[in-house]
Image: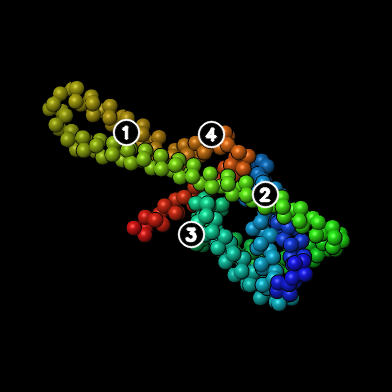
Amino acid sequence: MWDTRIAGVAMYNIIQWFYLYSFLGWVWETCYVSAKSRKFVNRGFISGPLCTIYGCGALSVYLILRPLNGQWPLLFVGGILVATVLEYITAVLMESIFHTSWWDYSDKRFNFQGRICLGASLGWGGFTLLLFLVFQPFVEWVVGLYSRQVGEFLAVVVTAGWLTDCTFSAMAAFRLSGKLASLEQLLEEKRQEFARQLAKAERLERHREFFEEAGESLEKLRENLSNTLADSREAWSDSSLHKALEESKRQWAAKESHNIRRFVKSYPHLNRGYRLRKNHWKGTK
């Protein structure tokens, strides 16, 4: 197994590089997000210090574009294309499997479905150049520091831990997606109830003259209803709804497993996956 070759590279080296790139990706992602948040944020799907998408992405880009090594303009363009396609496919798969979104570019210019955007794609092109110039020589140097026997042992141990971590993380993600769906449905029911109340108030407003003739008690009823709806408009505005949803998520996650708490803390756009799936099903009816 260790000497099986993929794109001319032995499986032993592929496995070693995969874990090294996953670790480097976790270091980068965690440091970047933690700096932006001004607090420690453990990024990655699993709990351990491995960001699998970086390992898969770096290896895929390297193995696919290796024949272009040294042709820097082609590597830059190729890196943009390969990494962007991988990012889009990963986003679709994660949303389809777990009904949650793990990143969102909706607020970025020139984005597509919030899953990819021009800025990130250009960044992947730059990363590809660094991959061939810096990172690949570095990971090859690291692998050369220890013997083949040690490398095989480490690969078996790390793979066992990685698979266990993936299993527990996937279980938490499935549970989280179900809870997010129930929270979103609850808010949707409240939105609909508010819409019904608003429509009723508007109908009453259109019959103001009737209330003026009917007497003070009915007029007072209308005023009370209008005041209640005015408060409701603020309580159920988009910003207030978002805050209420986030608070509900945090309160629920605080009583759940470590992975669920980490997901809620580290990925603020998880709900977007549920909404995308819901809108997709609406569109197919």
Q: Residues within 10 Å of mark 2 (few under 14, many from 20)?
A: few
Instruction: Look at the picture and state if 226 lies above or below 186.
Output: above
173 displayed left or right of 56:
left
- How far apart are the alpha carbons under marks 3 and 4? 30 Å
Marks 3 & 4, CB-CB < 8 Å contact: no
| Residue at the disc numbered 2 | 164
Name of the residue lying farthest toward the top: 217
Element type where label 2 sits in the image: helix
CB contact under 8 Å: marks 1 and 4: no
| Element assignment for label 3 | loop
Would you say residue 266 is visible in this rendering? Answer: no
Q: Position of residue 114 (x, y in %)?
A: 51, 57
Position of residue 192 in the picture relative to residue 21 (left or right)? left
Q: Residue at x 45, y 54 (%)?
A: 276
Q: Which residue is mark 1?
A: 229
For residue 213, which quarter of the picture?
top left
| Residue occupying image coordinates x 41% and y 52% | 278
Camera sees residue 86: yes
| Mark 1 or 3: the one toward you | 3
Say the numbered circle drawn on residue 251: 4
Q: Quadrant of the N terminus?
A: bottom right
Q: Give 163 or 45, whichever is nearer the viewer.
A: 163
